Image (cartoon, rainbow, N blue to C red):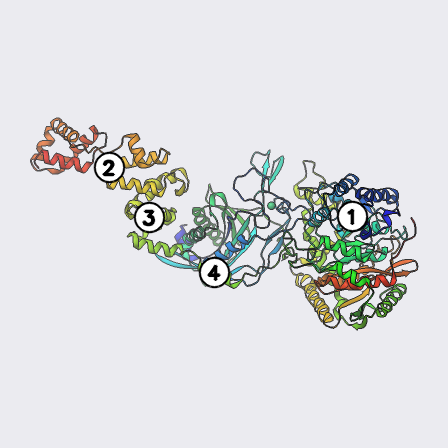
Amino acid sequence: MSDLTRMSAADLSKLITAKQVSAVEVATAHLDRIAAVDDRVHAFLHVDREGALEAAAAVDRGEITGPLAGVPIAVKDVVTTKGIPTTAASKILEGWKPPYDATIVERLKKAGMPILGKTNMDEFAMGSSTEYSAYGPTNNPWDLGRIPGGSGGGSAAAIAAYEAPLAIGTDTGGSIRQPGAVTGTVGAKPTYGGTSRYGLIAFSSSLDTPGPCARTVEDTALLHAVIAGHDPRDSTSINQAVPDVVRAAQIGKNGDLSGVKLGVVKEFTGDGSEPGVSAAFKESLEALVKLGAEVVEVSCPHFQYALPAYYLIAPSECSSNLARFDGVRYGLREGDDGNRSLEEVMSLTREAGFGPEVKRRIIIGTYALSSGYYDAYYGQAQKVRTLITRDFQSAFEKVDVLVSPTTPFVAFPFGSRTSDPYQMYLADLFTIPTNLYGGPAISVPCGLSEGLPVGFQIMAPTMADDRMYRVAAALESAVGTLTPPAL
Amino acid sequence: MSYEEILTRYEPVIGLETHVELGTRTKMFCGCKTDFGAEPNTQVCPVCLALPGALPVANRAGIEATIRIGLALNCDIAEWCRMARKNYFYPDMPKNFQTSQYDEPLCTDGYVDVTVDGKEYRIGIERVHLEEDTGKTLHVGGATGRIHGATESLVDYNRAGIPLVEIVTKPVPGLGELAPEVAKAYVAELRDIIRSLGVSDVRMEQGSLRCDVNTSLNRPGEEWGTRTETKNVNSLRSVERAVRSEIIRQSGILDEGGKIFQETRHFQETTGDTRPGRSKETATDYRYFPEPDLVPIAPDPAWVAELRAGLPERPSAKRARLRLEWGMSELDMQSAANAGAVELIEETIAAGASPAGARKWWLGELARRANEQSIDLAEVGATPAQVAALQKLVDEGKLNDKLARAVLEGVVAGEGDPAAVMAARGLEVVNDTGALTAAVDEAIAANPDIAAKIRDGKVAAAGALVGAVMKTTRGQADAKAVRDLILARLGA
Ligand SMILES: [Zn+2]
């Protein structure tokens, strides 16, 4: 039998269903791989060997069947898992064990998917490199001296390093797609409201979207189908049938895109990207044309304001969402020596518990919401959001999907962008507009630039997630998947 | 300086903010129960404890109750509005923001008419909005139960997330010296309206109706003065006292050329005056913004129309109607309303009592008992059916007034229905003519002087003999029957 950790989720599922391999064997292979390489990759903050093997055994006993039953998965540490530490990579939640499962975790368990552990990330999902994890960064399996993207660098790296075939990520401004791009893996941000946020530790409520990460488009679609769908516990969850993403991925695999219109976002094709990224993107576009797709250039004039609008809306919401971390009910409590006032204890707890990027965003958000500034900042950013949504809507009157590079640059060396927050924020330049609009988008590997992976982004209208999967699968069939050097 | 004299030189402007805790079965944004008095932290879940990752889902019953209150207060109902986050740190507020409403309240621009001394006053309603309650903090170890000196602070989150409706009046000028009475009458009317809707038990002493009173003074013809906000006003009487004491306090400062500062003050139940609250060095900036975790509230106009059609009769209109039906004076009706007796009297009449009989018991003996024990009339221990049965025994001549009161005592003590208490305590009126005649003859024989006077036509003297007979029958005789018998025996 070939190495189980190198197989796709779809293939593993077939073997498990045919009883050619047990779910316990599959889980064990991945747990062993984690034990072997994670000291170098540091994709995991917590590994639940016992829980994963127990869940796998239940599948082997025939208690649970289904398309992904027995296929193990890694979950980003910002999603609550009952009884398993969930820290959002922050000191302020060190050791916290949630008393409840997130809705998507419930769905994974119901589908019989053993949870291998919790993956590293930028603290509270704020960052593009995992360098803001309170527990140390994750290293990119393609080059251990480089970042794996962020905030979901742990989930992407775990997949790229064959520690897990599948992972859960969350995407607020690109936290699934950009790590996917720089690790040579696939990451999809579903339509906002298409996947439940219940149990996702909130960063920016109006933007946060949980989604699937995998090495192939088909695997991504299979996981998407497991976690998506209406959840009455999330008021913003959409009560509609989930688009058939699995079928769309299968159709796309045939490599026929005749009749499909791709819109290249004019504003994202200039010199904003590294030359190698632009080149890989252009080659992929030509490959898609060969598959029958029609390519037109589309202007989205307000996309240039997406980054500043995002950096007002997301911090504003985060300043309020993170107010609950005060040391009163759970997590870290600092300075409670019997002499200090409650206010002092709250303040010391937050001072000690939050890292620099989280503090920066809380301060920005608090300022932006202040009376007298609200209209100029938060109010204005909401107007920009509306304009960006209109750009998308008018673009989708002309084309089926929009395409761009996922991120302007390949994995960068550690420390190269931490001194200037703006340089870090640029990593999400191409991914942020989609979050502001609420539609789905996916990043697919599309080649290498100087030996490092480049991502190709496909954006679709809200609740048309299936469209992007079709194009993504077609692209994958043309350019193939990427294999990192051996660790 | 007298209160009346002050009001010749100053004009008060008042405003009231009232919080009503809704009686929904579950909390506003989660499925936790709302039972009063449960063990601390037994009615909590990830949502109302604000655990990381938990999300709110709005309770339709809370929205419905708010709309019904708005409709009953003649408000416009928003076709589309949003909840907002009010951000500030406080340990009994789990999220460190309160889910409330800001510039998009559910109900706006209504009014309530109240009557004081026969005159009607219209109180404008600025807004009615929906929000959630906080938990409760308990400071232990200190002598005062306050945070100062306490060794530990305990928080009970059972109340956190219970729906609250805030009702804000427009400023009310032009009331003159009646401002305190009108303020009180407004809160009483509001309480009656909300009670009639069945959306809250509106109990001030349990905190399900809480009131903040704003007061300012200005000299006639001048602009409105700076207002103070008085909190901790926990009874109807306190509403009146709080306004009066603020008028007196502020006038004292203004008379001496001083300035009123916009501040929060606390009403002191014991002294009846207001004291400054903890002064805040800087104004709190709540950084309101629309709650992104909840979808906008867009009540279907057909639903609102249905709720409007289903509103109960307005308590004041109902009182006017019942007053005519019952033949009550304006004053009696007012005291019935103030005592919370209108529904009880209504039910007693429905159970067969005459309006006068029903009124007599509820506003007399039972009101006295409720007052003594500081409880609601409804909790005094007698039901409308029992009061009706009691009055029936009186009407049938089986009980006289004094005996009926003794029977009621037994009823209130839980000894059973009036007939049972009467039998058990042996309280029935003595109607046996033989026994009564003997008692009368005995009294005549024992009081020959009085008997002689009566024979001479001084009928008024019979009272003394009636008293004697009542004494020997231990009050169980019908006084009128005794009197008639005495006069008959003496041929007067
Ligand atoms: Zn709850």
**Mark 2 Cα within 10 Å, few/some/many (few <14, many 20+)?**
many
Query: Amino acid type of disc 1?
Result: Thr
Compared with residue B471, is residue B194 higher up or lower down, i.e. above or below? Answer: below
Secondary-structure class at tag 2: loop
- Graded by Cα atoms within 10 Å as few (under 14), some (14 to 19) or many (20 or more), the crowding at tag 4 reads few
Residue type at numbered disc 4? Glu
Q: Where is residue B219 in the image (x, y as percent from the top left)?
A: 46, 59
Label 2, label 1: how many angstroms apart (C-alpha)?
88 Å
The 10 Å Cα crowd at callout 3, few under 14, some 14 to 19, many 20 or more, is some
Q: Where is residue A401 in the image (x, y as percent from the top left)?
A: 76, 67
**Subunit of label 3:** B
- The mark lying in front, picked from 3 and 1, is 1
Q: Are marks 2 and 4 on the same chain?
A: yes
Query: In which chain is the residue bearing label 4?
Result: B
Give me the C-alpha separation between circle 2 and circle 4: 50 Å
The image quadrant of residue A180 is bottom right
The numbered mark, 3 or 4, whose residue comes first in the sequence reads: 4
Label 3 sits on a secondary structure element that is helix
Q: Which of marks 2 and 4 is nearer the N terminus?
A: 4
The label on residue B306 is 4
Measured Cα–Cα span from mark 3 to mark 1: 73 Å
Image quarter where the C terminus of chain B lies is top left
The residue to which callout 2 is attached is B398
Which kind of residue does numbered mark 3 sit on? Ala
A315 sits to left or right of B266:
right
